[in-house]
Amino acid sequence: MTYWAHSSTAQPPDTHSRVGWQPLAEHLEAVSCLARELAAFARPDDERFQALASVGGLLHDYGKYTDAFQRMLSGGRDCQHSIHGAMIAHFGPSEATTPSAMPHLAAAIAGHHAGLPDLTGERSSLQDRLNQPQFVREALSLLARARGDCAPLATALAAESFAIPPGCVNETPQFDLITRMLFSCLVDADRLDSGGRRPTQAPLLAPQRLETVLRHISEIAAQAPESRVKQMRARVLEDCLQAASSTARLFSLSVPTGGGKTLASMAFALRRAALQPEQIRRVIVVIPYLSIIEQNAQVYSKVFGQAAVLEHHSGSHVKLRVQAAPAQSQRDSAQELNDIYVPAQEIDDEDACQRSSQRTETENWDSPLIVTTSVRFFESLFSNRPRDLRRVHNIARSIVILDEVQTLPRRLLGPLLGMIRELAEDWGVNFVFSTATQPAFERPVAKRDLRWPPGTVTEIIQEPEPLRSALRRTEIHWEIEQPVNWSQVAWRALDADQCLAIVNLRRHAGELYAEMKRLAAERGLDPAGFFHLSTRMSAAHRLRVLDVIRERLRARAHCHVVSTQLVEAGVDIDFPFVLRALAPLDSVIQAAGRADREGLRSALYGCPSGDVVVFLPEDNRMPPNEYAEAAAVTLAIVKAELEEGRHIQVDSKDAMTQYFERYYGTSGIDLGADLVELRRGSQGKFSTLADKFEMISSRARDVFVPDDDEAKQAIAELRAIGQLTGELRRRLQRHTVALNPSEFESMRQVITELRPASEIWIAVEPAYDQHVGLRGEVEAGRFII
């Protein structure tokens, strides 16, 4: 008798034909070989890890030998099949009830569809599932059938402890991460084989790509006028290339805004990979905001070619996990910094891999150059879902550039730093912490918190203080004694020919933009020179607007921009005058980097000549929790400095150190101790940890918006066929707006669902404004065609 792993997607389940069906023995053997191969890519010298992955592949679908599952393939009822192999891994192939030494393997097998479970606990834990007598009996009853059908499985079942080498000394303290890596190899192997694919593991080609990026940097430098900024960028690149040979694995790249971090950090990574070709196989650039990933992905694509760079962020329109709606209090205080990915519903079904047209690399990051978001990267590492964890094994032996690293949430700092250090020490991952405002990841000697001890991180820049002083191009004026209204801010902005005004909330951006337009009309100014930027606009729309803004700046035409925080970290724009609502100090410093970014005014006048004014709005509402607390710390420090007659500037190192120390807390401030505890030892609280870990505090939904003709055409096709194909997903990737729950509810009148329960949302055409983006209210006349 032939036992089957999968039916054919091309035939109805009740057909008698078995054409296109995959035999179970073939699938188990293939997944076993693939899992071992992936494990060897991740950890070449660890025979035990590779053996565990191989046995996991043989056992993961062991439960498909049941009659119930074989009937299901022909249209029968759904049935369990993952717990059977987990039981064999846990108890061994005998009547014994003493657990084996492989709880991580049992957890990986049990969760390869629904997700890694907690090992112990109440209902749905691995312990609870292993204690169900009917599955114990059924698992043991399948032994003879499985041995007779699959020779490699028979060999594994006959060997003592499955012939797996004994555990290494680091396995218990690293149980959490080892289990995730094992699970990742198993899930990716299973999905690859189900989809009829093989791992690519394309070479990084570091020497060739290093030559390419250095040539690109040289071409940019040749076109730039001589200036102090140009000289300092050359020094940054030189330091990056020299530091590439260091034996460290945790690096900081402390370079002020405009110092060329984006390309210099890539040059560092490629030089290091060229020097260590056997240790490093890919470069992953992790960026906090979509506003930056759009720009940086364009930069890397221009340098290396579009096909070389895998861009993976919220545009994939896939949920990490399903969550209940937040409480009203949580919705009322929802963060308005919605530049980061927010997920939509997921189906963890290996058979879907046979049908999916989505680019496989976005599922498993099997690409040499990857640009992704902080949420994608870290929630993959802390998730328990197969779709997220599938890519984790490909993080091993990589260089990870964490751009704008100061944005990592304080409440998660402990578990994030712990995960980073484990990846560096045991999985060959190199990290570069790149920012103009380097946070205090190392604790002072006298402190005992969850940060790293002094000396953990190696600074790439040989002389960071002189560099910081040399690259200072702005003068910050702290005008926070008296609050001002939006009309006063607008008047102040209009006094300059070119001005960037940055506020804390999308609502504030809309109000200030409207007031500025009103006053401009009274003055008779050309409305073409006024712009609004926020995440109410799609990525494609923002990129178009930024292109127009840059063109007007180059032409020295009048240009006034009102924006949320999305422009202040990494967005390449250069204004002579910047207005910034009171915000956290690192945010203010980042905003100052948009003033005289190229240093031309400062070079002309021989002193810092970009003007930055920090003001206190009358409506001083801002994103809650950590953001508001950081702004309060900033206000206290700035006031103390003002009393001494000093204005904090971008190169005020002592003030920045004081800010981060007070922000992280002198004592008792939670840096995520509860989450660190969930990862400790071998307790295996995978599901609980996934539920508690969130990079952002409020989930939102992506909405496709008709922001241009291309989006309108794709949306029309989407409505016509009634499903989101891989091609449409790619075409609509940058035509989305993320709405938090309260915003989503307020806009229900302008949003439609593709079909009931599809969780694919589309904004009606009149709701999208070409100046401010998606609006919740639409004038009746705009619906008239």
Image (cartoon, rainbow, N blue to C red):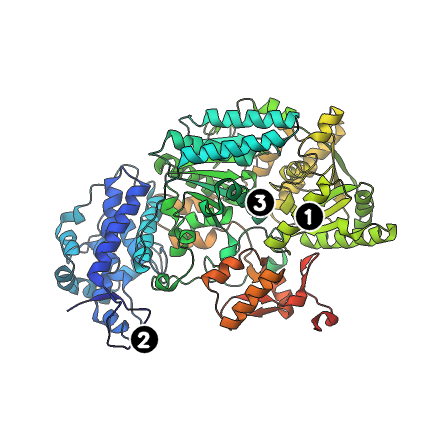
Residue at coordinates 53% horizontally, 53% vertically from top-left? 341
Residue highlighted by disc 2: 12
* CB atoms of marks 2 and 1 within 8 Å: no
Mark 2 or mark 1, whichever is nearer to me: 1
Q: Is label 3 in a helix, a strand or a loop?
A: helix
Q: Residues within 10 Å of mark 1 (few under 14, many from 20)?
A: some
Q: Which residue is found at the position 47% from the left and 24% from the top?
A: 242
User: Can I make out residue 90 in this image?
Assistant: no
Neighbourhood count class around disc 3 (C-alpha, 10 Å): few under 14, some 14–19, many 20 upward: some
Residue in the picture at 51% in, 49% down = 695
Residue under the point 63% across and 59% down = 332
Residue matched to label 1:
548
Q: Position of residue 230 (x, y in %)?
A: 62, 27
Residue labelled with disc 3: 295
Q: Mark 1 falls on what kind of element? A: helix
Q: Is residue 391 left or right of residue 508?
A: left
State how far apart marks 3 and 2 are (Cα). 46 Å
SS assignment at label 2: loop
Q: Quadrant of the N terminus?
A: bottom left
In front: mark 3 or mark 1?
Answer: 1
In depth, the one of 310 and 489 nearer the eye is: 310
Q: What amino acid does circle 2 point to?
A: Pro
As measured in the structure, the alpha-carbon distance from the residue carrying label 2 to the one carrying label 1 is 53 Å
Residue 555 image point, x, y percent: 74, 41
Which three-letter amino acid code belongs to the residue tagged 3?
Answer: Gln
Q: Is residue 280 left or right of residue 5?
A: right
Q: Earlier in the sequence, mark 2 or mark 1?
A: 2
Q: Amino acid at mark 1?
A: Val
